[in-house]
Amino acid sequence: MMYLFLIAGFALLVIGGGMLVRGAAALARRLNVSAVIVGMFIVGFGTSAPELMICVDAALAGKTGLALGNVIGSNIANVLLVLGVCALVAPLYVAPRTVYRDGLVMLVGTVGFAGLTLTGTIGFIEGAVLLGLMLAYSGYAAWAERYGGDPAAHMHAHEAEVMEDGPESLGASLAFLGAGLAGVLIGAELVVDGAVDIARTFAVPEVVIGLTVVALGTSLPELSTGIIAAMKRQHDFIIGNVLGSNLFNLFAIMGTTAMVRPVEVPASVAATDIWVMTGVMGLFVILLVTGWKLSRPEGGVLLALYVAYMAFLVVGV
């Protein structure tokens, strides 16, 4: 039954997340919201909605290790798995202007988050600060797009273009939005229940289940949309989606989770996994700025690193 819950939950997360993003994007366009805002906030948040719902649900159930593992594991999977697979589908060419701002913020934010985990607990105040930083950065980005001529706007506009095949009428947009939200909420509940049952059955720490099974499942929306974008050669969308999702995971999702319930950081995470995530983010930025291209061989290396990391976690259990 636990496997059925997990599979059904992931299916609802993928389908619901896609409907949520398309419904929200269509509604925003009807309200004359700019393509950049749609790309940065709606698409970025929508593809991270599975992580948010799972983490909040896990926190309410007192399973904060599962939530922490999901955030760290999702960020690792977004780079190694999503970018690796997308680069294998088609080499990714990156315009420097599209990553200077968000790439630097993601890297600095990751290092800061790693330092925060060394305190052993991410409490309400720390969570509020993380969420506040996300809101402040989002506000700045919106201002820069409108008044500052920010070059990163091109990347987020391309993200919105991928979602232009959504519903056209107001009623259909609201229906997509409502159905997508319901799917994500129910899917998150099923995934958490299934993951907790698996952890109990096999005596595996919840944080490891979060780093592996749950993180892989919640990265499926980014992977599916990324593959479609790679086939269409929409490189900016893929990079922007990963950058936006990782920022939302670290600041908005972890911040919200810690405000619901303090997150205890297991010693194993502080000693290993948080530094794996930090190293992966650094590798991500290095690969982008060296030649401004992610080739198929480099994509293969990223994917191999993800397989190796998963094997390390499984063997270490």
Image (tube, grey):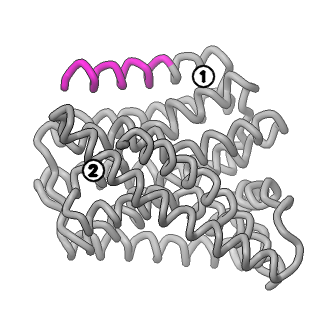
The kind of secondary structure the magenta stretch mainly shows is helix
Of callouts 1 and 2, the N-terminal one: 2
User: Callout 1: helix, strand or loop?
Assistant: helix
Which numbered mark, 1 or 2, is in the foreground of this view?
2
Amino acid beneath label 2: Leu
Residue depicted at 46% across the width and 38% down the height: 216
* 197 or 134: nearer the viewer: 197
Q: Which residues are magenta?
A: 304-317
Mark 2 lies on residue: 66
Q: Who is closer to the viewer here, 170 or 287? A: 170
Q: Is residue 244 visible?
A: no
Mark 1 sits on what residue?
Answer: 299
* Marking on residue 62: none
Which amino acid type is marked by label 1? Answer: Gly
Image check: 206 left or right of 30?
Answer: left
Crowding at dot 1, Cα within 10 Å, few <14 / some 14-19 / many 20+, comes out as: many
Residue at point 22% right, 44% down? 206
Membership of 58 in magenta stretch: no
